Image (cartoon, grey):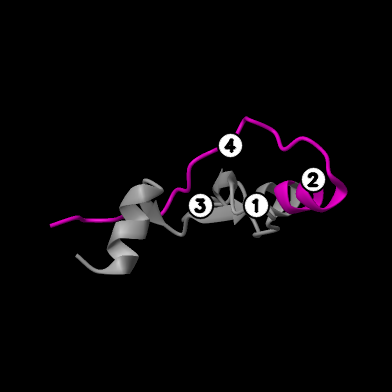
Amino acid sequence: MTKLRTLQKKYKAECTPEFYLFNEDRKLVYRGRFDETSPGSGKDPDGKDLRDAMYCLIEGEKISSEQYPSMGCNIKWK
């Protein structure tokens, strides 16, 4: 198994695109979507979910535990 696939499984990657944000201690602090857009939603991407998590990390604030999964193509494991 490749190192990338091992890493994907370790962090439970389910679909693309899925975003992971780590703190300075390399601890996973955010796993989820870029924003609320999805194919056919008619919304313009703004990156709000990921941007808010990054802002909180930089400012030392608590990152919301309400993290939504990405809504893209699922990863097919063999």
Which residues fall within the magenta stretch?
53-78
Q: Label 3, label 1: how many angstroms apart (C-alpha)?
A: 32 Å
Is disc 3 in contact with disc 4, using a CB cutoff of under 8 Å? no
Is disc 3 in contact with disc 1, using a CB cutoff of under 8 Å? no
Q: Label 2, label 3: how many angstroms apart (C-alpha)?
A: 24 Å
Amino acid type of the residue that numbered disc 1 sits on in the rendered structure: Asp
Q: Secondary structure at mark 1?
A: loop
Which one is in front in this view, the residue at disc 3 or the one at disc 4? 4
> Which residue appears at 36% of the width and 58% of the height?
7
Amino acid type of the residue that numbered disc 2 sits on in the rendered structure: Cys
Q: Label 1, label 4: how many angstroms apart (C-alpha)?
A: 20 Å
Is disc 1 in contact with disc 4, using a CB cutoff of under 8 Å? no
Q: Label 3, label 4: how many angstroms apart (C-alpha)?
A: 16 Å
On the question of residue 34 being in view, the answer is no
| Residue placed under numbered mark 2 in the picture | 56
Which one is in front in this view, the residue at disc 1 or the one at disc 4? 1
Amino acid type of the residue that numbered disc 4 sits on in the rendered structure: Gln
Q: Secondary structure at mark 2?
A: helix
Q: Residues within 10 Å of mark 1 (few under 14, many from 20)?
A: few
> Which residue appears at 54% of the width and 54% of the height?
20
Residue 56 image point, x, y percent: 79, 45
Q: Secondary structure at mark 4?
A: loop
Can you name the residue that lies furthest to the right here?
59
Which one is in front in this view, the residue at disc 1 or the one at disc 2? 1
- Position of 62 with respect to 42 (left or right) is right
